[in-house]
């Protein structure tokens, strides 16, 4: 099948096809790509559970709040922390929560006990949050916060260095709590604005001229005893360990795709989980010399993430593997990614574009050389093969566009098979373009749209008619050759036509060196009078430019006169059944022509009738010429010289 016939038509089709691919790709990437990848991760790839096995969760769950009503007294947190401080060899305790105020529901000793436990701990990291609202009344000054929790960061990026700060403040800390802290990390997450799913971790946040690590990254830095890392266009690099976190840079944070794990059977959690009340009870038992419910050895060399997920204390996020995944479990997953150096890496935009182009080209080749049914079978096979390759890549931590290339392939099929039907209209298009050089494009468009209903007749319509004429052109042309006259007229008309079109005007005819244009028909325009006057002013400016150019070229000086009238006229087809002309006739047209002629009498360039002036009085400065006798009119009338647009 020879699809491509004719260069011009081919290039137009290519542009349409590119636009089609662009639209399909945008819709697919925005609405389909992420859910498709989520489905593959959750139902087909089925990531292994437990991650690295180095992280365990301590959760305030339903069992915990059945024992102690929510919200908990801070002393209970203190007891849990003391268990890890005094009896375990846990590497770090990550507190996935923020403390913004004192506990006024309990005695001050409750807060004091917790804060002292934090102060004694050498392995406690607390969460805090950046806020998009202004600072609360009680807050730690930014310079004090930055001085205490400053990291040594080297920024080697060449892109996104001029960060836009969407955050206005840091969540407030009770001063006693702030003074007791040694390590903190932000708990900010930004979910997908389309479906609210959390797919990426905000690892480094820009705020007030400084960079701050997330709770997960701060934990990784802590367990590796370093506060140094480097930002590049592609990675966050931890200098001491050589860890490279592949990132997506935005103007306000630096993030990476999270690789989620499969939850335990019949559980919300992807990491081993303990009830917080069991930890507290074990602490009390050890203090009494009794055997603890949970042995401290369970946490040897473990990273402990402390969070809440219970009735009235729910902290969950929508993720690719769960509609309600506990926030602490998400933090544990991100830390796990870093410990295991196990990251999901999306293909670059250029790599995805290459895949789309390759499948599109393959589709064109197939439909160009095979009949419909064999071509469809081959393309379905190619689509299935690509889908399997995409699943294999995702299983190996590489995220390609999965659905977008297939959507573009389908669009390409439809476009390719539609192309042959489009070719049938080419002759009609050629005729239209050829006749459009003799008729106005807008009139030609009207004819084509009503191709089956062309007949004599028309309608009365309120419109504005513009006549323009070159002064003294007849005597001027007698001194020039026919070729010179033709060149001047062609250049003049070529400059006037776009101006008329710009203001919704239609050139009805060229009469020697004169132009007749109509406004308001066939292009509907309620401001036809104003647009006609604006058009005339721009035509006069263009003539001034042409005059300077032609004088420099040794050509004669030209002046034009323009007359404009607004009123009712007949618009439609006149002539015979075999020869039609789309035109405007009536007294409105005649008056416009005669007003134009008065430019010679009054040595003016632009005259308008009183009916036109009534429509444009608020946009023009004029001189009134009263009691003018117009040939064919019994009564004298006023006309107006337009000086300029007001």
Image (cartoon, rainbow, N blue to C red):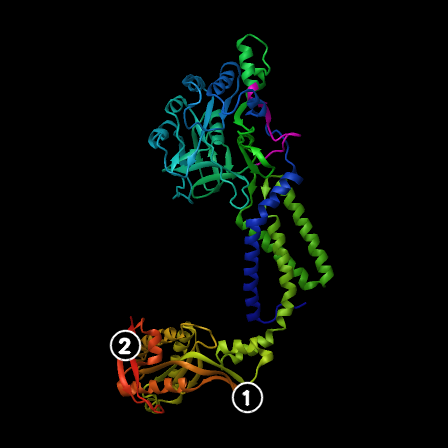
The residue closer to the viewer here, 456 or 199, is 456
Q: Choose top left, top right, bottom left or bottom right for residue 635.
A: bottom left
Task: Please give the name of the residue rendered at 71% of the width and 62% of the height, measured from the top-left corner.
Answer: 370
**The N terminus appears in which quarter of the rendering?**
bottom right
Residue 72 is marked as none
Can residue 55 be seen at all in this image of the molecule?
no
Q: Choose top left, top right, bottom left or bottom right for residue 112.
A: top left
Disc 1 is placed on an element classified as: loop
Magenta stretch: helix, strand or loop mostly: loop
The magenta stretch spans residue 26? no
Q: Position of residue 533 (x, y in %)?
A: 35, 75
Q: Which residue is mark 1?
A: 579
Q: What crowding class fits label 2: few (fewer than 14 Cα within 10 Å), some (14-19), or many (20 or more)?
A: some
Of the two numbered discs 1 and 2 on the same chain, state the one appearing first in sequence.
1
Q: Is residue 32 above or below residue 423?
A: above
Q: Which residue is mark 2?
A: 622
Q: What separation in Å lies between label 1 and label 2 (alpha carbons)?
A: 43 Å
Q: Is residue 189 above or below residue 378?
A: above
Disc 2 is placed on an element classified as: strand
Q: Position of residue 601 (x, y in %)?
A: 28, 88
Residue occupying the far top of the picture:
289
Q: Position of residue 602 (x, y in %)?
A: 26, 85
Looking at the image, residue 598 sits to the left or right of residue 358; the answer is left
Q: Which callout, 1 or 2, points to the residue nearer the camera?
A: 2
The residue closer to the viewer here, 215 or 172, is 172
The magenta stretch is 259-277
Can residue 100 be seen at all in this image of the molecule?
yes
The magenta stretch spans residue 273? yes
Q: What crowding class fits label 1: few (fewer than 14 Cα within 10 Å), some (14-19), or many (20 or more)?
A: few
Q: Choose top left, top right, bottom left or bottom right for residue 59.
A: top right
């Amino acid at each position: 099948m020879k699809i491509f016939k004719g260069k011009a038509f081919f290039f137009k089709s290519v542009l349409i096809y590119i636009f089609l691919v662009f639209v399909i790709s945008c819709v697919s990437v925005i609405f389909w790509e992420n859910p498709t990848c989520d489905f593959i991760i959750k139902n087909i790839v089925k990531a292994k559970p437990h991650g690295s096995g180095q992280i365990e969760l301590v959760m305030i769950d339903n069992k915990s709040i059945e024992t102690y009503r929510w919200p908990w007294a801070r002393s209970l947190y203190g007891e849990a922390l003391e268990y890890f401080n005094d009896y375990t060899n846990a590497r770090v305790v990550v507190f996935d929560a923020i403390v913004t105020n004192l506990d006024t529901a309990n005695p001050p000793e409750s807060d004091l006990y917790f804060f002292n436990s934090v102060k004694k701990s050498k392995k406690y990291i607390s969460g805090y949050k950046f806020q998009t609202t202004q600072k609360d009344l009680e807050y730690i000054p930014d310079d004090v916060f930055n001085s205490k929790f400053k990291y040594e960061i080297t920024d080697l990026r060449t892109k996104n260095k001029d960060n836009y700060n969407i955050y206005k403040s840091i969540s407030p800390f009770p001063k006693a709590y702030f003074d007791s802290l040694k390590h903190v990390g932000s708990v900010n997450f930004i979910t997908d604005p389309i479906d609210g799913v959390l797919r990426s971790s905000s690892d480094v946040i820009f705020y007030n001229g400084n960079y701050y690590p997330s709770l997960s990254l701060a934990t990784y830095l802590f367990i590796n005893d370093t506060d140094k890392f480097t930002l590049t266009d592609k990675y966050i690099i931890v200098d001491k360990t050589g860890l490279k976190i592949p990132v997506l840079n935005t103007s306000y944070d630096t993030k990476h795709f999270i690789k989620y794990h499969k939850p335990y059977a019949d559980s919300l959690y992807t990491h081993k989980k303990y009830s917080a009340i069991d930890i507290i009870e074990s602490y009390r038992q050890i203090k009494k010399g009794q055997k603890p419910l949970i042995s401290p050895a369970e946490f040897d060399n473990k990273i402990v993430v402390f969070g809440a997920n219970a009735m009235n204390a729910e902290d969950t996020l929508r993720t690719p593997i769960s509609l309600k995944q506990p926030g602490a479990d998400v933090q544990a997953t991100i830390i796990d990614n870093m410990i295991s150096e196990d990251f999901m890496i999306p293909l670059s935009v250029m790599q995805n574009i290459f895949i789309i182009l390759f499948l599109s080209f393959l589709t064109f080749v197939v439909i160009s050389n095979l009949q419909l049914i064999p071509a469809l079978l081959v393309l379905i096979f190619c689509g299935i093969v690509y889908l399997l390759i995409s699943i294999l890549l995702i299983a190996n931590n590489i995220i390609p566009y999965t659905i977008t290339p297939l959507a573009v392939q389908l669009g390409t099929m439809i476009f390719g098979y539609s192309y042959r039907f489009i070719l049938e209209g080419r002759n009609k298009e050629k005729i239209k373009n050829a006749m459009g050089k003799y008729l106005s494009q807008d009139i030609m468009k009207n004819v084509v749209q009503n191709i089956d209903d062309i007949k004599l007749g028309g309608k009365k319509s309120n419109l504005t008619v513009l006549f323009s004429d070159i002064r003294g052109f007849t005597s001027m042309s007698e001194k020039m050759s026919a070729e010179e006259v033709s060149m001047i007229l062609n250049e003049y008309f070529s400059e006037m036509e776009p101006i008329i079109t710009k203001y919704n005007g239609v050139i009805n005819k060229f009469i020697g060196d004169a132009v007749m244009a109509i406004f308001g028909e066939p292009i509907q325009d309620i401001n036809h009078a104003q647009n006609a006057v604006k058009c005339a002013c721009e035509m006069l400016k263009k003539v001034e430019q042409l005059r300077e150019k032609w004088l420099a070229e040794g050509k004669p000086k030209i002046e034009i006169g323009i007359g404009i009238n607004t009123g009712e006229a007949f618009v439609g087809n006149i002539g015979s059944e075999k020869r039609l002309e789309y035109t405007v006739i009536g007294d409105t047209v005649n008056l416009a022509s005669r007003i134009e002629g008065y430019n010679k009498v009054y040595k003016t360039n632009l005259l308008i009738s009183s009916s036109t002036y009534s429509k444009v009085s608020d946009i023009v400065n004029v001189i009134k010429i009263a009691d003018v006798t117009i040939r064919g009119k019994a009564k004298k009338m006023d006309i107006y010289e337009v000086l300029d647009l007001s």
